[in-house]
Image (cartoon, grey):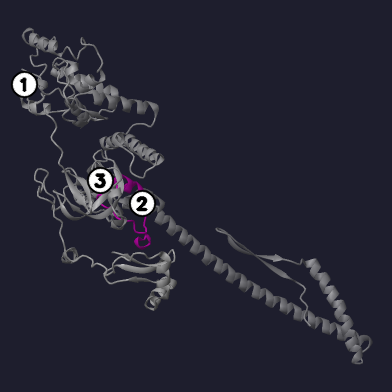
Amino acid sequence: MTIRYLILGKKLINNNNINSVEQVPVVDVELSCLLDTRINHGESKELRQYGESLGLANEDLIRFIESQQAKQRDDRRFEREREKEEWEVEKVRLEHELELKRLDNTRLFETEKHREEKGNVNPSKVPKLPPFEEGTDDMDAYLRRYERYAISQKWDKSIWATHLSALLKGNALNVYALMPSDQALDYDALKTCLLKRYNMTEDGFKQKFRSCRPEFGETFQQFSVRLGSYFSRWIDMSNVLKTFDGLYDLMLRDQFLHICSNEVMLFLKERVPKSIDEMTRYADQFKEARRVNIVSLTNQTQKGKSQPSQKPNNARNQEPPKQSDRDRNRHTGGYGGGNRFDRKCFKCNKSDHLISNCPLLKNKVGNVQNSGSRGKETPICGNVITLTDSIITTQVSNLTIPEQCEKKPIKMPVAKGKLGNRVVTVLRDTGCNGVVIKKSLVSIDCFLDDYQTCVLADGSSVKVPIAIITIDSPYYQGEVKAWCMEQPLYDVIIGNIDGAREPYDPDISPTVSVVTRQQAKKRDNPYPKLKVPGSIKDVSLEDIEYEQQSDASLSKLRQYVAEGRNFEKTNGTKVNYILKKKLMYREFMSK
C-alpha cells in the first residue's frame, strides 16, 4: 500500500489580460513530517506482526522492520519525484496553451481596432437598405436615415458616398454621375448637391415651413413634429446659432426680405448677408447707387394691405397727388439729387406712367376688389394668389376691369343625366381629371375594395372609396371608375377622361342607353300571364280552405308548404308556396 505524504495543488488564474499557473503547497513540510511519523508508526506495527509470523525475534526482527521501512521510503520518494515530473510537464503544457490563447485574443483585438479605425466593413455583412424612390421618398429624410444607419454600423465617413451611390436612382443618380470624381467620393459634397437638386435649401425648407398644412389621416401631434422638423432644417441650412440672438437675427432678416421689392430682394440674396446689419448695409448701398426713394424699394402691395381702414387723406388715397409731385420733380431735379427717373413702370420700364396705368395690362384682370372710381364696388372677377418670399398673401392689383366682368357669370356646364334609373345633375369640369359621384347614389354592389387619395383645389387631400358606375349623360356615356364623396356640389362631376365631350359641345339629343340583345328580348317578350280561371262568387274562405285540403291534385303543394321548399328557375325568378290564414298561396318573385 502506497501512502503519499505531500499534496500539491494547482491554481489557474485567467482573465482578459493575465494568464498564469501557480504551484501552491497545500500541506507544508512540518505537516508532511508528522504524517510520515504516523505512517512509520503504523507500518512498523504491521511489519512487526508480519516478522513475528515469520519467526523473527530480537535483532533479526528489528533489522527486518528497518529494511522494509527503508524500502517503502524509497518507493514513496520515487513516487513523489515521478509526480513532480508529471506536474512540471503539465505546467509547461498549460502555460503554452494560455500563451496561445493570449496571442489569439491580442490578434482579435488588433483586428477589431483596425476595422473600426479604417472602416473596413465586409460588404457581405452589410444589410441592404431600400433604394431611393424618385417621387415617393423625401431626399432629406432619406439622407438622415442613411447617416444614422452608417453611424450605428461604425462606417468610416470616407466610404459613405460610395455606399450611398449604390442606393440612388433616377435624377439622384444623374447628380452623382455628373459630379467630378474627387467630389463624388466626398459625402458632404454629394449631400449638398443632392439637397440642391431637390430644392432642400434654406429657401426650400422655409417655404415648406410657411406652407405646411395637415395631411389626410394625420394627427395634430404628428403635424407639429413635421412642422418642427421643417423649422429645424431651415435653421440648420441657414448656418445660424441655435440661440435667442441667432433666431432673432434670422427672423429679422426674413421679415426684412419680405417687405423689400423683388429687385432689392434678389440683390440681397446674391450677396448672402450673415446678419441683419450686413443686410441693411447692402440695402443702403443699393438705394444710394440708384438715388431713389426708399418707398419705391419696398413692397407697395403689403403697404396697401396693412392700412385698409385709413381715412381718405392717407398715403394710399394721395397717390394721384404723388403723381403730380413726380411730374413737378421731373422739372425741378427730383428728390434732392436730379434723377429724372425716380419712379417708373415695373412692366415696361417707362417713366411716363406707373404700372397701374400701363397699356400692356389694360386687358388683364387681377384680384380686383374695387375699381377706385367714385367709390363704386365691382364684383370680384379673379383671385391671383402670389407666393411671396416668406408668407402666402393675396396679391391686389389696381388694374382696369374689362366690360365682360360687368356681365353676369357664364352658366355652368350642367345637364341632366341618368345613373341607372335615377335622374341626376351632371357637371362637366375641365379642372378635374376623374369622375366624382355622390356616395348615397351608388349601390353597395358597385363599390370596389379600394381607396384612392383625391387632391382638392385648395391642396388638401381626402381618401375616398372607388366604385364602377354606368353614366348616361350629354357629356359622357358608358362605364367608368368614380370617386365617391359624401357631399359634392353636383350629383355627378365628369372631368377630363377619355370619351368625355367638351363643355361647349354636349350631346343634346335624347340620351339612349346601350341595349344588349338579351335586354331587347326581355323588353319585347314580357313575362307571360298566369292562366287562372275567372272569379268565383258566393264562396267563403272556409269553402276554399276545405277544397284545398281535400283536392288530391294539391297534395304536392301541401307537401311543399310543410317542408318550406323554394324553387328558383333558370331565368332567375323564384317561386315558393306559403300558408297564410289557413290558405295556400303561390308567391312569385321576379329577378
Residue stretch rendered in magenta on the structure: 119-145
Is 380 drawn above or below residue 307 in the view shown?
Answer: below
Image quadrant in which the C terminus is located: bottom left
Say which mark, if any, is on residue 156: 2
Is 114 drawn above or below residue 373 in the view shown?
Answer: below
Say which mark, if any, is on residue 194: 3
Q: Residue furthest top?
A: 332
Residue 122 relative to residue 490: left or right: right
Circles 1 and 3, Cβ within 8 Å, touching? The answer is no
Residue 283 relative to residue 68: left or right: left
- Quote the CA–CA distance across marks 1 and 3: 42 Å
- The answer to whether any part of residue 65 appears in the image is yes
- Quote the CA–CA distance across marks 2 and 1: 61 Å
- Quote the CA–CA distance across marks 3 and 2: 21 Å
* Image-quadrant location for residue 382: top left
Residue position marked by numbered label 1 in the rendering: 350
Q: Nearer the viewer, mark 1 or mark 3?
A: 1
Give amino acid for label 1. Answer: Lys
Is tag 3's residue or tag 2's residue first in the polypeptide sequence? 2
Residue 263: x %, y % from top left: 16, 26
Give amino acid for label 2. Answer: Asp
* Image-quadrant location for residue 541: bottom left
Q: Secondary structure at mark 3?
A: helix
Q: Residue furthest right?
A: 58
Q: Secondary structure at mark 1?
A: loop
Residue 32 relative to residue 204: left or right: right
Q: Residue at x 5, y 8 (%)?
A: 331
Secondary structure character of the magenta stretch overall: loop
Assess whether residue 101 is covered by the magenta stretch: no
Q: Nearer the viewer, mark 3 or mark 2?
A: 3
Residue 436: x %, y % from top left: 24, 47
